[in-house]
Structure formats: structure tokens, C-alpha cells
Amino acid sequence: MKFANRIIIAFVAFVFILLSCGKAPHTSNFNPDKLDSIYLASSSVPRTIDSLLQAGVIGRMGADFFMVNYYADVNDTLAMAIADTALNRKIENYQDRYYHSMTAGMSLQLDYLNGHYERGLRRTKQFLDSADPDFIASHHKLVSNYLLLNSLLGYFNIYLYRFDEAEAQLKKTIGLIDKYEVDAHGDSAALQRYEVVRIRMANSAMIAYCNMKQDDRSMKWLQLAETYINDYVQKYGPKNTVESMNYKVLMMKALFLNRMGRTAEAELAYQQAIKNPYYNTQAGRFNSVDYLLESHQYDQALKNIDRIEEFLRYRKMKWTLDNVSGFVALRFKAYLGVGRRDSALAIATRIVNSLDSARVWVKRDKAAELATIYDMNDKEAQIAEKEASLLQTRITALLIAIVLLTFFFIVYSVLRRRAAKMEAVQHRIEGELQIARDIQMSMVPHEFPHREGLDMYASMTPAKEVGGDLYGYLIRGHMLYFAVGDVSGKGVPASLFMAQATRLFRTLANQDMMPAEICTRMNYELGGEDNVNGMFVTMWIGMLNMDNGHLHFCNAGHNPPVIGGGENHGDFLQMESNAPIGLWPDLEYIGEEIDSIKGRPLFVYTDGLNEAEDPQQVQFGDDRLLDILRNTHFDTAQQVIETLAAQVAEHRRGAEANDDLTMLCLRVS
């Protein structure tokens, strides 16, 4: 988001010019608003400034101010040199004092833009400490300049890690805006102007805190900016300036929500942002790149980055070292994200060519700076100093080119080797996980009893390569033991715990134990000292007399099954919950029984069914589960399970499964 700072500050030079009229100046001969209009209408700014200077309409101080304005958008270094020269001039009248104050404001903005935070902090304090309230109140642009510099003092503190001081200063600035709003009661143009200043301050504070990785503070100012923008739109309707700031707020909101893992909300904020007209500008597309990279939308990020050259031409920016390094860094990340490592190498080559152009512009800018200083000051000592600085810049540019080229080749080589190793490791892991999945799936039955009067079917779908759900059954004479379970966690650890639980269930059922006794013994075995990770399994175990339909069962913290029949044609089974197996080894589990479930389908499942989520994280839900079962005619147990599986898939609409899904259905007639 640092590049966004440059975009914001680049327009500040014209903020004062665009503001509506306020209090009249002290003299009838000096009208800053009229001079600003002449400046804006000029097709050749330097020639116009020279003409005004020769005619005596403006003095040397005023000429310096307009030259700083002119160069601030195209050559920061030259603009700063002119501003430093102007601020050392003698102040002789009100016009000089006015332009001295405005030039100081521009100079301090350039300090902020170019990262001179310590210098900016010191100079801004000095300026504000010496400010004369009566003089500031003499013209509305001086008031705006004063408010801007109070804001800048807050931003300088942010970038110097002085966050408490920054908050105090920004709070003070809000208080000043409130005061000026009270003074401007009835002046709708002034009130609207202060609303914009308030929005701009919150927006810039939000970006500064984000750049310093202070997400909580940045989020606070984001919310303030949202509030200010909404208030403004309600009063005055949407305006271009406010729309651009609202776009930055929405894009930052998407970035923060994505970092918090709230990806659906983040994407919603992003979709709102790209509906904003500002998105279709070059700057708007470029400001979206941070979110697109962090949300792994690398293809779209590349499309927007590809338009940077158009953007640079539009803003009349040169291929400076800052622009080259910032552009390359973003594009390099995007190419790595989409796996185009050869393109990353091409970018490393291109930076060298771009740096050649950057060095040329450095030379031209320095030469122009020398000419300007000579023309304004005729100081040979300064010219010699600048020539030495020019030589140093050439050497520095060459060293930077060498360092960057070396860095990118090193990164590229390391990434290629690492990618090759990771690919080999990934193939090995995928092979081992496939073996583990095959072993796990072999532990659950895929053939079901072929017995007259019994219809039974089950399925299990892990969310990952291996999972923690289980089901199983065992026939002992005319008794059918069956179980469904859900181990805490997912992946390999859950699958190992699942294997233990499955083995214990079959072993204990072979000993003709009651379901409650099976749960008690399993809990003792799995909940001992060996369970160092505190894993557990919820289970529902049944023992069905296939002749008369009598059912003994025990629920160990599992979801309640759905039993058919009754007035509602299906309801959740009311029962003891008990605790999951594996948490407290000394528990005695309580069993229950139903005289007969003949003709009443029984549906047992894991929470991967009712908690299945769609792309907006809306769950499938218990009510939908009941509604489907009540309105699905029972043909076979397999048909019931396949119907529900299809309904879950339709609900997910392509969203990744968030949990393992296991279902078992049976009916005895």
C-alpha cells in the first residue's frame, strides 16, 4: 500500500487550488484564487510563472511556490530543492508570507512522500509551533494547509513507530476540524471542504498504519473513514474525490478481512470495490494488487500490474528507481504465485533495462536541478555540491542495478531448486497418503448384510486424503452390532485414532457385550495415559435383534440419529448424550433401548452432514436434514443415502468440504 501513499500525496498539490472561495485576502492587489486559476489554465507553466514574475504580479516567493507545485508531480527531487531555496528567502510582505507558508506545506508533503520522516517530523513541529492563528484564518487555503500539516505530523509519528503520539496528534487534528466547522456555520462550501479533509485524514491514517503492520489501528481508522464517507454522501451525494477514497477503504477492508480468514466477506468487499468507477482508472487497478496477491488471485493481479506502464505514462511518472523496484516486486510475487518462474527470470532481466532508463532520468533530473539552482541563486558552491551529488547518484544507480540483478538470479535459482525438492517430496507424500487412504477405506465394510428383512447401507467421504470418521458392523447370530463415529480433528492423526476405535469396537462386539459396556471399555482403553494429545471420538453404537426389531443402543456424545415413523414421519431420537470416548477413562456409560424399530428407518450420521457449508459458510442444518428425510419415500437404504449426498453437494455449490461425511441407514421389516 506504500504506492497508494504516492497517489494520494500526488494530488495534494492541487487540493488548495480546487477548494472553493473562503475569506478574502488582506490586500486588494493579491488574490491567490485568481493566480491559481491562471496557473491551472496555463499550457506552459514555467513561461507563465516567468511572465507573472516579470510583470510584478508575483514575487520570487510566489514564483517558487508555483514551480514547486509544477515539479512536485513530475520530479520530487527538483521540487524539494526549489522549496528548500524558497524557504530561506527573506519575507517582505503579506504575499511572501502567504506563499512561504504554502511552500512549507508542499515541502513537508514531499518529505512525507519521499520517506524523510525524521526530518519531516522536526520541521513540521517547528512550523506548527510558530504558526500565527490570525494569519492562518486570513485565507481558507491557509486553514487547509494548517490542517494538512497537523495530519502530516500524525503520519510522521506513525512511520517512526510513535503510535501513541500519532493517535494524540490525529485526535487533535479532528478537534481542529470540529472547531473550524463551528466557525464556518452556515458556509456550506466550507463545511463540505472540512468533511473532505476529515475523510482524507482518516484514509491516509488507515494506509499509514497498514504499511506499518498495525492492522488493529488501521482497521479503526478504516471504520472512521467509512463513517465519514457515509455522512458525506448522505449530505452531498457521491463525488469523484470521495468515491476514490471510498474505493481505497473498500479495497483495504477486503485486504484485512482476508488476513483474518474471513475470505467470503473479503471477496464481497472486493466485489463492491470493483463496482466503484475509480476501479476503472489506472491507479484504481493498481491499488487492487495487494488484495489480489494475498487472496492468491494471481492471474487477475498480473492483469492489473500489466497496466502499470500505462499508469506511469498517465501520471507522467518516469522509470525512477522507486517505481522500478516497486513494480518489479509486485510482478515478481504474482509470477511466483502462478508458478511462472521463467517469467520471473525475464523480470530480472527487464529491471536492468528499466534501471538504464531510470539512471538516464536521474541524470536529467539532476541536470535540471543544477540549472534551476544556477538560475535562481547563481551560487557556484551549490552547483559544485550538486555535481558531486550527481556523480554519487550515478555510482549508486549502478550498484543498485548490480545488486538487484544478483538478488533476482539468486532468488530464482534458490526457488527452482526448492521447487524441485518440494515437488519430489509432494509426490512422495501424495503416494503415502494414497496408501493410507486405501488402508483406511479397507477398514470400513463395503459389502452389507444380505439377510431377509434387513436393508442396510453406509458411506464415508473423508474431507482430506484420510479422515477421522468411521462406521462398521458385526453380526453375531440374530444380533446386528453397528456403529458410526467421528474422531476429533482431521487428517493422519485422526485416521490413526479411527483405526484404534474401529479395532476396539469389533473386538468388544465379538464378546457379545452390550453397547453401553462397549463404550465404557473403549473409553478406558483410549482415554488412558497414552492419549497424550487428548483426542476423542463421538460414537453411536447399536445392537439390533434382527428377528423382533428390539434395539439396544448407547450414545457417546454423538449427533442424534433420525428415526422414521411417528406423527411427523421422522424425528431426532431423544436419548442420553453421555461424553465422547477418550476424555475421562473412568466413566460408566448409560445404555438405552427401544422395544421395536420394525418398519421405522434409522439414519445415523456425522456432523459433516448437518454442518456442511456453502461458499458463504451457511450450514446445511438440522432442519433441512429432517425435511429431506421426512419427504423422501424410503425405497432402499442406499437410495436414502445417495439422495442426501446429492443434496449436500448441491448445497456446497463447489465449496471445499469442511469435514468428513459418514452416513448409515438401515430398516428391519
Image: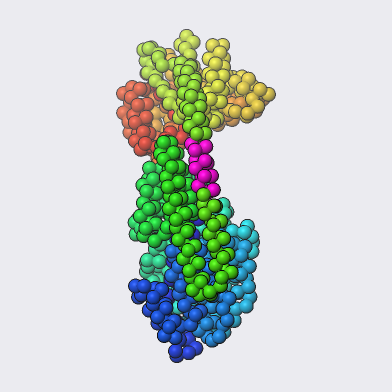
Q: Quadrant of the C terminus?
A: top left
- Could you tell me which residue is drawn at 49 percent across and 66 percent down? 369
The answer to whether residue 359 is visible is: yes
Residue at 39% x, 28% y is 564
Residue 175 x/y as whole percent: 57, 73
Residue 592 visible at all: no
The residue at 64%/21% (across/down) is: 524
Judge from the rendering whether residue 198 lies leftward or rightward of residue 626; answer left or right: right
Name the spot of residue 318 as percent of width and height, x first: 42, 57
Q: Is residue 129 magenta?
A: no
| Residue farthest right in this picture | 529
Looking at the image, which residue is at 53% across and 85% down? 94
Towards the viewer: 42 or 6:
42
Residue 335 rendering spot, x and y as whole percentages: 42, 40
Residue 208, by quadrant, is bottom right
Q: Is residue 90 above or below residue 163?
A: below
Judging depth in this view, the residue of 74 and 600 nearest the camera is 74
Quarter where residue 71 is shown:
bottom left
The residue at the far top in this view is 477
Looking at this view, name the residue that lies furthest to the bottom.
28
Part of the protein shown in magenta? 399-412
Number of numbered discs present?
0
Q: Main secondary structure of the magenta part?
A: helix
In front: 513, or 173?
173
Instruction: List x then y, in percent, for residue 254.
Output: 45, 51
Here the colouring is rainbow
Q: In which image quadrant can residue 519 be found?
A: top right
